[in-house]
Image (cartoon, rainbow, N blue to C red):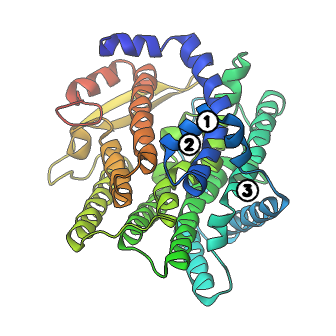
Amino acid sequence: MTVSLAKRVYAHPVLRGTIIPALLLLLSPPFTLLTITTCQTYGGDLLATARVALAAPNALLAALPRPSWWAAGILAVYTAVQYALLVLLPGRRFVAQLTPMGNRPTYRLNGVAAFVINVVAVVVAGRAGLLHPGVVYDRYGELLATINLIACVAVVALYFKGRYAPQNTDSTVSGNLVWDLYWGTELHPELGGVSLKQLVNCRLGMMAWADVVLCFSFAQAERHGGLSNGMAVSAAIQLLYIAKFFVWEAGYFNSIDITHDRFGFLICWGCLCWVPSVYTLPSMYMASRPVHLSAAGALGVLALGVVSVAANYDADRQRQRVRATNGATTVWGKPPVLVHAKYVTGDGRHHNNILLASGWWGQARHVNYLSEIMLALAWTLPAGFDHITPYVYVCFLTVLLVDRAERDDLRCRAKYGPYWSDYCARVPYSIIPYVY
C-alpha cells in the first residue's frame, strides 16, 4: 500500500470519524490500567500481560485496579490545590489568537511559579518525611482507576454542556454521537471564569506528570536504598521538559490542542488519564527495576535530552518572536522569510497572519515535533531494552505527531488556501528535514 493510498484510507470519514474514535473510547481507559498492572504484577513485561490476557483473561481482570474513595479524596485535594494556584498566583493576562468564530480566549500566565511550588513541595515534604511519595506508586492503580471513572463522566457532561449550554459561539454538534464524545463539542469551555483547557491540560495533566515522576523516583529510592543514575537522568530530562513547557505556556495556547481540538475525550480524558499513565511509563517501569548506566551513557543520554529541549524551546521562541514583532527581527542572523497570509473567520471578518519560512521553520513545517520525539527517546533510553513497555510512549508520540502534522496541514490549507500552498512550496518537508 502506497503512502498516498494509506492516507486516503485513513482519512475516510467513517473510519476516522466513527470507527477509530469508537475503538479509542472503548480501549484507551483499560489500557491505562494495564500500564500500572504490567509494571507491578507482570514484571514490567507488556508482552507477558498480553499473553495472560489471551490465556487467562479472568486472571488479568482480577489483577486490574479498582477505584477507591481514598483515591477520590486525593484527586479532589490535588485538583483544588491546582485550581487555587491558577487563580491566586500572580501572572499576566494573555490574550490568545482569534478562534474560528472570532472570539479571543484569555489565560493567566503563572505556570512557572506553580511548577516551582509543586516540585519544591513534593521534594521537601518527601525528604522531611511529611509526605510518603512512595505510597503514590503503591496505590497508583487506584488513582488511575478513579480518575478514569471521573474523566469519563466529565466527557459525557461536557458533551451535554456543549449541546445545551455552550460557552460561546465556538461550539458545534456534528450529529455523530461517537465523534462528538471523542472530539468534544466546545472549543473553550470555562469553570468559574477559568479555562478548562488550561486547568486540565496544563495544571492537572502536565503538573501531575512532574509530580508523579518525582513520586516514582522516591519510590525507587525507598525500595532500593537509593536512586539509580538511570532514573535520575530520566526524571531530570522530563522535569526539564515540563519546566520548559510552563516557560513557554503562552505559546502552547496557540497550539493545535488549544486553537483547533475541542474539549472532549481526546483532550480532557487524554490529559487526565493518558498523560499520567503512558507519559510516565519509563519512570513507572524503573520504580521497581533500577537501571544503572555507565558514566558515559548517563552523560550521553542527558546531553541528548538537554540539546533536544534547547532546540524545541528555541524553535518555539523563534516563531513567537517573529509574530510578536510582526517580522521586524532577525532569524539566525538574517531577516526572516515570511509568507503574508490572509484568512476569514466564521463571523465574516478578514484577518492577516505571517507564516515563518526560515530558521528552524524553514527546515520543516513541524520541525518542533522532531525534537519532541528525540526528547521522549532520551528519557526512555535509561530504562534499557529488556522490555518494550517503557517505549510505548515513544511509539505513541511518533504516531500522534505524524497524525497531528497531517491534521494541522489540512486545517491550515482550509484556513489560508493559496497562502498555505505557497508556504508548503517554500518548506516542503513536514517533520524531518530532507526526509519527511
Q: Earlier in the sequence, mark 2 or mark 3?
A: 2
Q: Do the CB atoms of the residues marked 1 and 2 lie less than 8 Å apart? A: yes
Q: Residues within 10 Å of mark 1 (few under 14, many from 20)?
A: some
For this orientation, the residue located farthest to the bottom is 128
The kind of residue on which mark 2 rests is Thr
The CA span between labels 2 and 3 is 19 Å
x, y percent for residue 207: 58, 62
For this orientation, the residue located farthest to the front is 55
| Helix, strand or loop status at disc 3 | helix
Q: Earlier in the sequence, mark 3 or mark 1?
A: 1
Q: Residue at x 27, y 25 (%)?
A: 424
Q: Residues within 10 Å of mark 2 (few under 14, many from 20)?
A: many
Q: Nearer the viewer, residue 258 or 96?
A: 258
The kind of residue on which mark 1 rests is Ala
The CA span between labels 1 and 2 is 6 Å
Residue 142's tag is 3
Q: Nearer the viewer, residue 62 or 130?
A: 62
| Helix, strand or loop status at disc 1 | helix
Q: Residue at x 72, y 51 (%)?
A: 65
Residue 53's tag is 1
| The C terminus - image quarter | top left
